[in-house]
Amino acid sequence: MINQFLISVFAILGDGLVSFDRDIMPILSQKCLKCHGIDEESRKGKLRLDQGNSALKGGRSGKPALVPGKTDESEIYQRIIASEQNLIMPPLSTRIILTNKEKGLIKKWIEQGGKYEKHWSFENLKPVSIPQNSNAPWVKSPIDSFVYEKHRANGLSPAPEADKLTLVRRLYLDLIGLPPTPEQAMSFASDTSTDSYEKLVEKLLASPSYGERWARRWMDLARYADTNGYEKDRYRSIWPWRDWVINALNRDLSFDQFSILQLAGDMDSHGRQENIVATGFHRNTMLNEEGGIDPLEFRYYAMVDRVNTTAATWLGLTLNCAQCHTHKYDPITHHDYYSLMAFLNNADDVEMDVGVQNQVFSKSSNQQYIQKQKAISERWLQTIKDQDKNLFDAWCLQQKEKLASWRTIVPLKMNGGLIQLNKLEDGSILGHGDISKQDVYELEFEGDFKDVSGIRLEVLPDSSLPSNGPGMCDYEGPRGDFFLGEIEAFLGGRKILLANASESYFKNHFGNGRAGAAQAVDGDFQTGWSCAGLFGQRHEAVFELDKLPASGEKLKIKMTFGRHYACPLGRFRFSVTNRLNPKASSLPEKVQSEILSELPQELKIHTLIHYLGSKDEFKKDVLELQQLENPKKSGLTSLVLKERPATHKRSTFVYHRGEFLSPKEKVDADLLSLFESDKLKNADRLQFARWLFSNDNPLTARVVVNRHWQAFFGTGLVKTLEDFGIQGEYPTHPELLDWLANDFRSSGWSVKNLHRTIVLSATYRQASFRKDGQMANLRLINVYPRNRLEAEVIRDSILATSGLLSFKIGGPGVFPPQPAGVTNEGTYGKLAWNTSNGEDRFRRGLYTFVKRTAPYAMFSTFDGPTGESCVARREVSNSPLQALSMMNDPVVMEAAEYLGTQASKTIKDDAQIINHLYMSILTRQPSSSELIKLLDFHGEVLKQLDSNQMEVKIITNQKGDSRTAAWIVVARALLNLDEAITKR
Amino acid sequence: MLKNLASRRWFLRDCSMGLGSMALGGLLQGSLKADNDSNGLVPHYPSKAKRVIHLFMAGAPSQLELFDYKPELAKLEGKPLPASVIGNQRYAFIRPDAAVLGPRFTFQKHGKSGAEISSVLPNISKIADELCLVKSMRTDQFNHAPAQIYFNTGFQQPGRPSIGSWTLYGLGSETKNIPGFVVLSTGSGISGGAACWSSGFLPGAFAGVRLRNQGDPILNMYNPRGISPAVQKKTINLVNSLNLEAYRKDSDPEILTRIRQYEMAFEMQTSAPELLDLSSETKETLELYGCDPLKPSFARSCLMARRMVERGVRFVSLYHEGWDAHSNVEGNCRNNAAATDRGSAALVLDLKRRGLLEDTLVIWGGEFGRTPMVETNPALGRSQGRDHHPQAFTIWMAGGGIKSGMTYGKTDEMGFHVVENQVHVRDLHATILHLLGFDHERFSVTMQGLEFRLTGVEKANVIKTILA
């Protein structure tokens, strides 16, 4: 293939001079560098050909591989033309063959001096001078000057400008992803002012639909979906991120700021919640919730995805292979890959409440709470009789007898493996870090444990934990869950028997086995204590033991967590008692301490309230009070990144062959070595994101303008949007690409400005066909290249054409009609596709709920992505299933029904109806032969329908006659035209 | 590259017929000239298997209950395996020191070949001499979704072309009326999802097409209500005639491809109902499969698979889910065997008597095996189950150039490790491609600057011993 490509590029450029980078490097990289490249491990004969000085020096043989100007002395050339089987390169065993053309190029290159050059895209951007042809009448902008030069060099000429109706449709589809209505089209066509085109461009750039159109393309790169992927493929809430993108594009947030927030908004938040929401970009990685997976393994895969996606999106590099070994073609080492990962690897994946600002509830500071509390106790005091007071006192006394007095103990040493355990002021311990299926906490206490007869474990809520804890489980199992498989205590190394365990609460989320504290001391790791269901609350377990001797030895407590999912404790506290036979109490903590305290009865307000909770006349009030304690969360969350504190950085390692089970040496964050800079050694994610937009980075500006170019012209100036490396395609217009990149930078990275620059060019305004017999050349753009619309644009167009489209922006994913069973037949994680009602049936495609394992059927048919990996360039296929979809999908039928019914109701003349349908669907008037065909077709269909009133009723939804039905059939046919789903 | 490659392929295969003498040469100029790459499209050797039916036993059946008889396990029942055997293998649910569970069924030797098969598979036992049992399968993955995706695409993450897509890409389709790669499923749901039949970076036209049990068997196969076949035909004629006019103006070859797709779609609409209508099958055939022609079942899908390959479908993937026996492996195998045994055996027999088995490869198996150790978990309410086991499992194949009446590979006495003739999933892939006529090392697609193969970058071997 590379052969063919070379010939074509060579033919395009045709200047007789061989360029190393353009002509020679692709041959070397494809056919030689596997054995003579950057990778030392696979290098043969100690010969390296990717660098000029090594080629001059030669390999093990001692002979120079390259002697500039002299093919007969250059071993490179001699070996590729050798006839002896044992000498010929590449060796016959590799089955790699150099063509005569390639050999010829290498010969010519050596003759012309055999110079090595840096790969074009790795060279810093330099100012480009615009070809001096601006007096050519066709040239409207610098873009045209570059394109015109290439035309001239290849004997081509531009196509005439497209007519106004074609242009208005093209602009609408490109800039806002929707076709114009007939009125919009006519208003432009009839605007004779000289700047009518410019005015239209500005109008569309300012349209709120603009952000929706361009957000969908960004979502492809971000691998957006509304489910987690893999087997369970459950729902996730990350659409606030999608809405952030739409909004940012609409207000033309500069692309550098946009990107910095996408990658590191949590570190650059300036207190703005929306900046943190932006980090959802990399939270779009998949999450495997299948029972029994290793969460750290899938976290690693997610990190690999983040590295690959970052590289494809901002650097235009395919790093994927460097995950396992040093890149065979590009100067990217295995080590480089993980250095880049280290920038991204220091964040926690968290779910942020984005509805209301997360308020920490505090009983003492909440006036409403205190007043209500006071009101209850006052009402009680006013209404009680003496005997009631006595009953309360007696109840307190009774409780006091049951309660042990506990002394908090704080460990001196703690070890939680990957989980960092931190002491808090109240003696409790809070965990932070990566959880796994078996986490073990080891705590060492010093002090006097004489006569200790019970150990209490309190599990506590904390706002840093999923669902406020007390556990750390954040997927597969319920969020905030923990499962204490076993708790063991040792005194001076000897195990102490823990017995008669009790707990304030327990619940097992999976299975029906008991999951109480007793199961945590039964010697079986598979059973244990869990408090599923009541998250964000304090619970306690008490373990009895034989009175300890006055040994002065250390007390060690070991807790083992985990089941088929990861679920260690997040926050907890230990205390001991000397009281015999202590039991867990279900009284709230404050009540316990009030009862045990010497406070006068009337000041034991929490106790009183708790007590009153069971009395009929106070139940309601107490319940209301409790509700104040748990302020309702909005329930609206989004997945975000949260950089870890400096005190608990995550280490990054090189993984041998990219395998999760083979971590090797630790690596520091650093730029890819090809950038030849150590400015970012040990820098963080934010610094990396900012570096992308520094003048030191030659790639990002080029990669981004190229991707936008492709959106308008169907093919990039570099066809391989995602690969600007050595295997990527050489640009057809290198100077134009660099000019655009420079312009993008100097405009302050304004995407709208870039779009304006492109659509204002004469290049963009050409017709899609030529009448002069000159062959269309889509790469050198002597016509405007026709391209099929993207899946979502096809559906949006159909809805817009028929006036059904909703213009509502943002919100959760919607469920437009689709055939039965797509999301629940044969899928493991079933999803009932409950079709949305009202306008949500007719929202733009980017709002359609994306289920990764079973994407929206029509979008899949038209090459929509699944959201499983970063897509820079969608394939465009052309299949019979697309034809079935257009002919038979209810969406098309519904639109046709609307169009046909309206037209037949409001327009009398048949030809005018056809005109109207053409304007609605194709934004043009029919030709006379088209008109005749359609009149005939309508007549024939009408004849058939006249004899079948049943069909008429169904087609018109009981609302019309056979003439209307026939117009519906006509509209359906027009919606099926290739032109209706094509940009031209 | 792929866009043009794909559409041109459709064009060459299909349009050259449909559009008669439309100037081929002229169409290939312009944008398409750089793409006449025929990498892998002409088989490297003659294809012994011309089509494949993959009976995918999703959830992973227990080889120890079905094919790999280990009496030693009965002796050891209740005791843990030595740590040296287990090594550092990770498990999904059990702890490595779990006790051993003996086989739940009796086994007998069958046929001339003497293949040892469980009593729970009476029908498959009867066709033992048609089968090649591979008892030494090995995979890298031990969770369902990644393992299923791996078995189907050679990579554990979604995004690569499935083996069906590679096959269709390599050999093209023999039918214009039905999709060339069809996917059916019966059971509870496929963990790997659509990634298992995805075309990955190959064009969507090579993806598996679901034949559904609800609604239209092929999405949008039936006309909208009220649109008669006559109106549909007229509409397609009009659309194609107007499209042709557009082509005369814009000269975009995609329009010609579109025209052909509409013709094909109409052909599909007319011939698919015939495919799905089982009324032409004899009572004897229905009895052989043991299926109700009107009710979705694994057996009915097997019969449908035969009808499809008869009509030129290149690759049929038939998923049966439900083998994930974390508890009560005995009951699980009993139920799933009852659902699949007869249909699987009938398919092989039926293909054979119609002379189709010779060049149709049938593959039966799951994504990994199950542990010799018992899975018991009081907290989860599980007992007498088996966990996921990637080190050793069994599949069988028949027809399509595979040796019949053969057992290949061996596991140790505990059924834990392969001790003879290990067949890694990528070796199986290499072997299947070989049977289809492709050298797996040369059958590649260049994408994003990288060369991708079904068998990946690790060394894979064609298992020559099992070739007929």
Image (spheres, coloured by chain):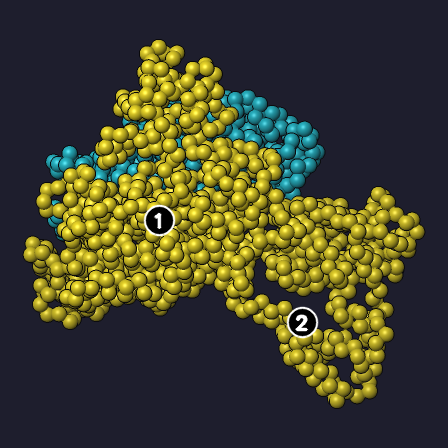
Chain colours: A yellow, B cyan
Residue A38 at x, y = what percent? 46, 29
Residue at horizontal 48%, vertical 20%?
A46
Say what amino acid the circle numbered 2 marks: Ser
Badge 2: chain ID = A
> Which-is-in-front pick, marks 1 and 2?
1
Badge 1 or badge 2: first in the primary sequence: 2
Residue A230 at x, y = what percent? 48, 47
Residue B393 or residue A33, whichever sits in front: A33
Task: Locate the N terminus of chain B by quadrant.
Answer: top left
Mark 2 residue element: loop
Residue B99's quadrant in the figure? top right
Residue A818 at x, y = what percent? 34, 56
The numbered mark at residue A104 is none
**A83 over A232 or under it: above or below:** above
Q: Are marks 1 and 2 on the same chain?
A: yes
Residue at horizontal 43%, vertical 36%?
B153
Mark 1 residue element: helix
The numbered mark at residue A741 is 1
What residue does disc 2 label? A362
Residue A226's quadrant in the figure? bottom left
Residue A762 at x, y = what percent? 20, 53
Residue at horizontal 86%, vertical 45%?
A492
Residue at horizontal 39%, vertical 50%?
A220
Query: Dot 1: within a 10 Å radius of its alpha carbon, few (fewer than 14), some, or many (20 or more) residues?
Result: many
Q: Is residue B347 visible?
A: no
Say what amino acid the circle numbered 1 marks: Ala
**B26 over A766 or under it: above or below:** above
Query: Dot 2: within a 10 Å radius of its alpha carbon, few (fewer than 14), some, or many (20 or more) residues?
Result: few
Q: Are marks 1 and 2 in contact (CB under 8 Å)?
A: no
